[in-house]
Amino acid sequence: MKWSYMDHWRSASPNGPIDQWQTLDSMDRFLKQVAAVGYDAIDTFDHRYFQIMDQYGSVSNYQEFVQERGLERIVNTFHAAVYDPRTYAPHVPETHANILEDFRVTMDRWSGISLDNIIVMPATLYYDMEPVTDDKIKTTAELWNKVGAITLDAGVKLTCHHEFFCGIQSKHELDVFYANTDPALVNLFVDTAQHCIATVDPVDFYEQYADRVTGFHFKDTRHQDLVGDYRRRPDAELMATTTPKWFHEMGDEGGLVDFEAFMRAVVRNGYEGWLSVEHDKANKLGGDHAESTAIARWYAKNVLDRIVAEEGSK
Amino acid sequence: MTAGWSYALNQWRQSPTSFVRLEEHERAFKTVSAAGFRAVELWAGTGRWSNLGRPEHLRLNYGSAAGFLDRLAECGIDAVSSLTWDPSAPAAEEGFELRSTSRPADHGAILRAAETYLELLSELGCERIVVRATEPAGRLGSGFDAAAVASVLDRLGAAAQDHGVRVAVDIDCLSPSARPTASRGCSSSPTAPSSTCRSAPRISSWRASTRSRSSATTRPASGTSISRTPTSRTRKRATCFRVRKSTSCRGTRAVRSNAGSSSSGATPVSSTLPLC
């Protein structure tokens, strides 16, 4: 099992909080910290392309910069699209041409390196898709089948990451979506915390779709959304009444995800691929990205690795 | 004239996902109030995390512009002094277009985008929109067109006046027109006549253009004013004064107000921490 770190990061600077893309020096420090605590690779967002071009000249140059600091490569990119029902919305057929062209451009931009997955949130914000009907989900599935063909042609798997506030997040919505997408073209990326918040048991869900899973975000949460925060405008996650901070490191004292059971399921299903750790907004309420990243790695090394060994020996 | 002090709230937004929750706004308003400021400056933004930077989100979160003013009042803030807006910044709500004030083909889109903010400012009783004159020199390359910039700012000034709002032009350190003096071997005096400066054509042609449809010694009919310090003439048109101490730029930059005034008779003064 190899671990990759999804590159959310903030650190202090004389000019206030910065992310690692601020300068080459801040990127250097970020990558060395990730490597030092034992991660093997990183994931990133593909909208960083423009900064990469400005600062490194090409995507492959940036990957070399990563490799020179002891990390194997860039494993996945997250395609964080800004959905807009007028121009870019998977459930709106009139916008599909725009979306398909966006993926052709994106895959071309990243063609200089070998990626495992391009990760998408496959639906708009929930409130932009309401009422969420089976027909809208089927329209959405048709789009992603076409996008999956584009990405696969570029040698990259399309995989879907369901935020708790996206238009496809309940168990029924998920089942309709995966029943209408082609397993050869559309894969699943299980974010343990997001499904847990949406009251979908991540272990059961993973077991059901294990043959379609091409990656994970390992992170924990202390809360489920039981009050309809997923529909809150304009931002469901950040303005939720349930909690101002949804995400915590795996193994968190108050965490709801059963990572031991989850990892046993991963091994039992013969998963072969990278495992990604994500700390979305770890710096909220006094948190610290560097510390969270180290703590998660400690848990993987001292708890999950033991489970992998135990389960593998059965 | 009595000066009033305002504080620019962009200081609180240290990352794209910070300063989104309403309780964070409340703490900022109370902090500003406790420090003796009586007004706040908003800034234009984009996306669902920009709760004070998008008019639709501000109304959604506070019920209406009046609801926002009520919340400010409860926290001890009397007014919204101004709103800063960069027409060249891409906004999701406007299709992520990279607009340029130097490009006449973009002027229609810029004016349409401004309308959203002018309506809000009118509802808020805010008399001033601070408009970044141009995108950074690095992005513009050789495309800077002072006459085109002046033209759209004049049209913007006229549109603003229809809403009871004045346009204050913000020329920042990245602007292609921001360094006509020191960098070209001219006098560094902030009040030196532009005619003494060899590089004057940039800023002075702009100034001349924006003056062309209005009196040079009184408030321009268009409502456009220039918030920069190079000449005593521009001082007559300044409507606000941004004070910021910068650790990366040299010195403190300021634009003095001696013209416009708020409804209370005080001219708000905005203070921000480093933006350069």
Image (cartoon, grey):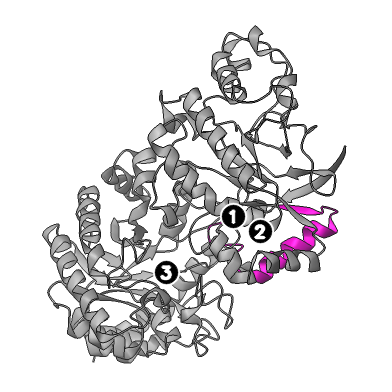
Picture coordinates of residue B28, whole percent (x, y):
72, 61
Q: Is residue A93 left or right of residue A3?
A: left
The residue pinned by badge 2 equals: B123
Please report the bounds of the magenta region as a residue range.
B15-40
From where the camera sits, is residue A150 visible? yes
From where the camera sits, is residue B20 visible? no
- Nearer the camera: disc 2 or disc 3: 2
For marks 2 and 3, give the CA distance: 42 Å
Q: Is residue B131 left or right of residue A236?
A: right
Which of B94 and A146 lies nearest the eye of the viewer? B94
Residue B30 is covered by the magenta coloring: yes
Picture coordinates of residue A41, whole percent (x, y):
33, 60
- Chain for numbered disc 1: B
Which of B159 and B66 lies nearest the eye of the viewer? B159
Q: Which mark is residue B119?
A: 1
- Quarter of the figure with residue A309: bottom left
Q: Quadrant of the C terminus of chain B?
A: top right
Say what amino acid the circle numbered 2 marks: Glu
Residue B50 is covered by the magenta coloring: no
Please give the name of the residue rendered at 18% of the width and 65% of the height, measured from the top-left corner. Answer: A147
The residue pinned by badge 3 equals: A278
**Do tag 2 and tag 1 residues touch (Cβ < 8 Å)?**
yes
- Chain for numbered disc 3: A
